[in-house]
Image (cartoon, rainbow, N blue to C red):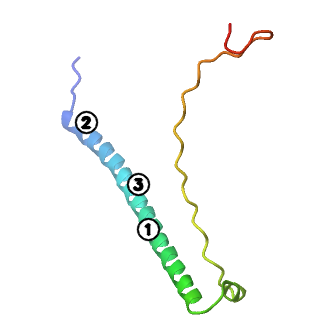
Amino acid sequence: MATHIDAEKIEQELQQRLNSRMDSVRALVKSRTSIANARAALQEAEDEDTRRYQAALSAGWTAEELRVSGLPEPEKKLRARKRAARKPAAAKQPATAGEPAGHQ
């Protein structure tokens, strides 16, 4: 008994699955783009806030006067520290009791 394989139907089903998978990736890309844009906008707003705070100080306001009126100093940004390169571990074995270090 021969089984009929409908290649066109199989291809359509697989294409629908592929389209669904691609739609999920498109939605993810859209979400990640939105996050990146929001971060950039936040950074720009924070930079502007810092400039305007400095302008207020330059205009004669003190940090204390601004703080008391509800305008504290802008938050300081944490600077990312560069990680030091790892040094390879020395192939030393601990000295046993009674032996000087480096002798086995």
Placement of 29 over or under 41, stated as above or below: above
Q: Indicate the amino acid at tag 3.
A: Leu
Q: Indicate the amino acid at tag 1.
A: Ala
Q: Which circle, 3 or 1, is nearer the viewer? A: 1
Residue holding disc 3: 28
Residue that appears at 63% across and 78% down: 73
Labelled pair 3, 2 in contact (Cβ < 8 Å): no
Which residue is at the far top?
A: 104
Residue holding disc 2: 10
Q: In screen coordinates, is 43 left or right of 62?
A: left
Q: Which circle, 3 or 2, is nearer the viewer? A: 3
Q: Indicate the amino acid at tag 2.
A: Ile
> Looking at the image, is mark 3 or mark 2 earlier in the sequence?
2
Give the class, few, some or many, for how many residues have Cα within 10 Å of label 1's Cα (few <14, many ≥20): few
Quarter location, residue 101: top right
SS for tag 3? helix
Alpha carbons under labels 3 and 1: distance apart: 18 Å
SS for tag 2? helix
Q: In screen coordinates, is 19 left or right of 84?
A: left
Residue that appears at 44% across and 68% down: 40
Residue holding disc 1: 40
Residue that appears at 61% across and 71% down: 75
Q: In screen coordinates, is 15 left or right of 94?
A: left
Alpha carbons under labels 1 and 2: distance apart: 45 Å
Q: Quadrant of the N terminus?
A: top left
Labelled pair 1, 2 in contact (Cβ < 8 Å): no
Residue 91's x, y, as percent?
59, 18
Residue that appears at 70% across and 85% down: 64
SS for tag 1? helix
